[in-house]
Amino acid sequence: MKFLHTSDWHIGKSLKGRSRLDDQEAVLREVVGIARDNEVDAVLVAGDVYDSAAPSAEAQRLAVQTLLGFQRTGAEVIVIAGNHDHPRSFEAYRPLMGAAGITMVGTPRRADKGGVIAFNARGTGEPVRVAVLPFLSQRFAIRAAELVTQTPAQNAARYDQVVRDLLTALRSGFSDEAVNLVLAHLTVTGGQLGGGERLAQSIFDYYVPATAFPADAHYVALGHLHRRQTLPAPCPVEYCGSPLAVDFGEQDNTPVVRVVTASPGTPASGVDIPVTTGRRLRTVRGTVAELADGAAEYGDAYLRVWVREPARAGLREQVQEVLPNALEVRIDPEFAAAAAAAAAGDRPSRPSTGQRGPGELFHEYLGSQNVADDRVERLFARLHDEIVGAERDG
């Protein structure tokens, strides 16, 4: 049988105040097309459907539209809640989504109470068992009293053990004659951050080793870390990553979904299918003139711009005039450090004669901050004269 593994859509995520719903819709439409073209038997969505626990109506519309699109391909559709999703909302929608042929799971369940989903692959008739483990918060796994009274190491060990116990219990729903899969949203030791995750929910004590997963699972489909990666384990343990970079920390990631083939008694094997729609994110550097010369090369990508010029009033607006897709404009840190070092080297240790006036001191300060703008100095001089004049007249 074949299934598609995807995760971390983060529908509703904006970037520097810019809505990305259009990009998210284009990407998810492409992913539905990949499922349809590959005639997969199932689609596994490993959490973080939304970017917020209170998604907008537009974000919910896109999520429902996408899940129904998967269902119309004839595939089994199974989706679990991630740490950005609202687990109780998933459970509230569970009956309605179930009527539409979509299995939605918001909270951990016993194997015989919805924790293991069983079906037969439409293409081959092979039995399939999917053990589902939505995001398990530390508050759920560890009681408040334990969080206060125990050490971080003890709490981490407790979280690890709770997850292991849940996976062991879910394994009871596996069958030797079936394709046995695990669908989970969590942090696994050794996993690399994609660049856009919330660190407090990724690496601060709450994780499990890849060996926590049952060795007889044909495939472990993970969500949470946004970088595509395989973790060493007795069975295939895979993060598919996010199909769209959520911020500039992920600009170098290659967005993919996975199409995986599995059969009873044989470990699964999968291929990464690149996702090509959606605007890319890019960091560019240069002077304003250099950036203007390269504008055509940047296409429609959203840009983080590091300017290699001293700061001045109106610089951001000037950059955005030549690069309308510039979402973030900053002075290049390397340029700023070099300019500050040069200014420090040129500055005398003490005035050669007399005491420096306020204008000279302010000029020196601007140089230390890598700001070169005569208008600022003239404004300072005018304000200084007004204050001195008022004090003299008073």
Image (cartoon, grey):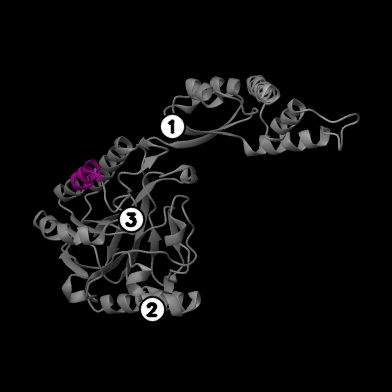
- The residues colored magenta run 56-66
Disc number placed over residue 142 in the picture, else none: none
Question: Label 2 amino acid?
Answer: Ala
Q: Nearer the viewer, residue 386 or 29?
A: 386
Quadrant in which the N terminus appears: bottom left
Q: CA distance from mark 1 to mark 3?
A: 26 Å
Question: Element under label 3?
Answer: loop
Q: Mark 3, residues whose alpha carbon is within 10 Å: few (<14), some, or many (≥20)? A: many
Question: Label 3 amino acid?
Answer: His
Q: CA distance from mark 3 to mark 2?
A: 25 Å
Tell whether position 62 is magenta.
yes
Q: Is 55 placed above or below 213 here?
A: above
Question: Label 1 amino acid?
Answer: Ala
Residue corresponding to mark 1: 301
Residue placed farthest to the front in the image?
394
The x, y position of residue 237, in whole percent, is 39, 65
Question: Element under label 1?
Answer: loop
Quadrant in which the C terminus appears: top right
Name the residue at 72% across, 35% down: 368
Residue corresponding to mark 2: 145
Name the residue at 48% across, 56% down: 193
Residue corresponding to mark 3: 84
Question: Element under label 2?
Answer: helix
Q: Are marks 1 and 2 in contact (CB under 8 Å)?
A: no
Q: Nearer the viewer, residue 192 or 81?
A: 81
Can I make out residue 136 in this image? yes
Q: Please, what is the dominant secondary structure of the magenta stretch?
A: helix
State which tag comes first along the sequence, 3 or 2: 3
